[in-house]
Image (cartoon, coloured by chain):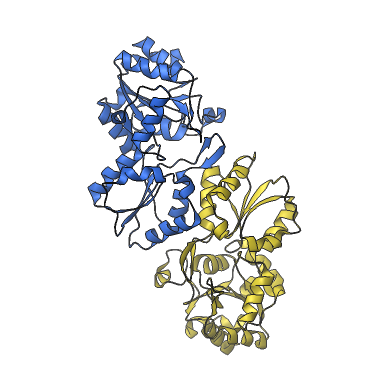
Chain colours: A yellow, B blue
Amino acid sequence: VRAAMAGWARAVRGLLLDVSGVLYDSGADGGVPIAGSVEAVRRIKASGLKLRFCTNETQATRENFVKKLRGMGFDISVSEVTAPAPAACHILKERGLRPHLLVHDDLVPEFAEIEKTNPNCVVLGDAAENFTYGKLNEAFRVLIGMEKPVLISLGRGRYYKETDGLKLDVGAYMKALEYACDVQAEVVGKPSKRFFESALAEMGVPAEQAVMIGDDIVNDVGGAQRCGMRALQVRTGKYRPSDENHPDVKPDAYVNNLAEAVDIILQQL
Amino acid sequence: VRAAMAGWARAVRGLLLDVSGVLYDSGADGGVPIAGSVEAVRRIKASGLKLRFCTNETQATRENFVKKLRGMGFDISVSEVTAPAPAACHILKERGLRPHLLVHDDLVPEFAEIEKTNPNCVVLGDAAENFTYGKLNEAFRVLIGMEKPVLISLGRGRYYKETDGLKLDVGAYMKALEYACDVQAEVVGKPSKRFFESALAEMGVPAEQAVMIGDDIVNDVGGAQRCGMRALQVRTGKYRPSDENHPDVKPDAYVNNLAEAVDIILQQL
């Protein structure tokens, strides 16, 4: 690993960190930090490297998400987090879109400033228990009733693991609506290029001097590499050994966890 | 229309009729017959033409479905109906598959003879109110837990109309599970070639002497034509004027309704 990274790690000026599966493992009980990650975040901040948290989390507002992470001991603030809902709000305002929301109840406050009457698009997040037959049909009817349906999806993940088992992620419901309405969703969040670029801009580091560290081979690693970044896959979170044979995506290196990634990068500087 | 059909209608020996949208319009109240359809079925039977009902209905057993139609005045019996659930049972037995069912409660009796313990496939129908977040996740977990996931979908419709509005059909949920599990569903029902072929075999008429009459441009018309049949689209049920500009499928003729189709065909004989 060190050898693989020796060539480029010394040029690194900023890190983008995925959160779930890298900093902590989520679950109904709130989740638990991954060993060494609290300390690793602290070491990044002490090193002078730029740092940004880049998450597809849509089950809570950034405020509540950060509060939970701070409760686990992480040095993180709302202003350091790039997340899909605020990015979607930016797009909605820019294009005069009024969303019908199919999202988690706890995410709704992120859209407080957005006009929602007489909707002309549907915004889909990981709605979890709100993915009822009735609410899915309702979102479908709003969408199919539009002359040109606009579907904005907060991520395109296939599934994720919680303490009580695997759950379908927003991408599965996105595919259902795409098929029913013969429309292509616009994805806000990883692996969207625009999303990574806004995270880089907020961090003030060009792509070639930035490294993404994530557990998702497609949405973290593949997405970041397509933006010109280096990307490491951690062997925590949703990582599976079969990821190392992925047909399309090859990380710049594998690391056992965030702590190991930070060790190596800091040694190269 | 008559001119378009004059060349081939005299060779017709059998008719395959779609049911919902051709014989009747479905709805929460049970539905209502489409004007002229009861008499049209009677005339087909009196003519000596072979007749088979070919439906993707999966919200009831054939027994209950036929009972409802007889209640509306249709001359129809269970043995004349080709439907996805019995076709799926045939495949399950043939391949030793034990299904986890995600279907409508009223369809379950069709699978009474099938071994369902320790499932090695998922059978997906239009489960309607059974499409809950919990039951979708359950079917997903069964599927993703298989070494080689087998997903059998009873149809691939995008949506349908009931008296209280549009509803997502089984195809949308099929796409969600396909995406989440990176698997391709096997579709039983229209437009599957095997399904049409078994309807033709049951009727005892070769494809080139059979006509499919349906309201669904893709699943009825396109599917039947790919099997070598002629196919008419009625302007009832889910027909929309935009169907007449469909990029891939062109019916052999359009008719206003089943009664008109039967008028023309019987005149040519």
Please provide percent x and percent y for residue B207: 30, 27
Relative to B62, B259 lies left or right:
right
Relative to B176, A77 lies left or right:
right
Please provide percent x and percent y for residue B150: 34, 54
Identified at 30% across, 40% down, the residue is B87
Identified at 45% across, 55% down, the residue is B135
> Closer to the camera, A133 or B254?
A133
> Closer to the camera, A30 or A185?
A30
- When asked about the image quadrant of residue A15, the answer is bottom right
The mark tally for this picture is 0
Residue A118 in view of the camera = yes
> Closer to the camera, B38 or A140?
B38
**Image vertical order of residue A155 relative to residue A236, above or below:** above
Indicate the quadrant containing the C terminus of chain A: top left, top right, bottom left or bottom right.
bottom right
Please provide percent x and percent y for residue B148: 33, 59
**Image vertical order of residue A264 relative to residue B255, above or below:** below
Please provide percent x and percent y for residue A160: 49, 66
- When asked about the image quadrant of residue B126, the answer is top left
Relative to B102, B77 lies left or right:
left
Identified at 25% across, 30% down, the residue is B201
Residue A13 in view of the camera = no
**Image vertical order of residue B152 relative to residue B235, above or below:** below
**Image vertical order of residue A183 relative to residue B235, above or below:** below
- When asked about the image quadrant of residue A102, the answer is bottom right
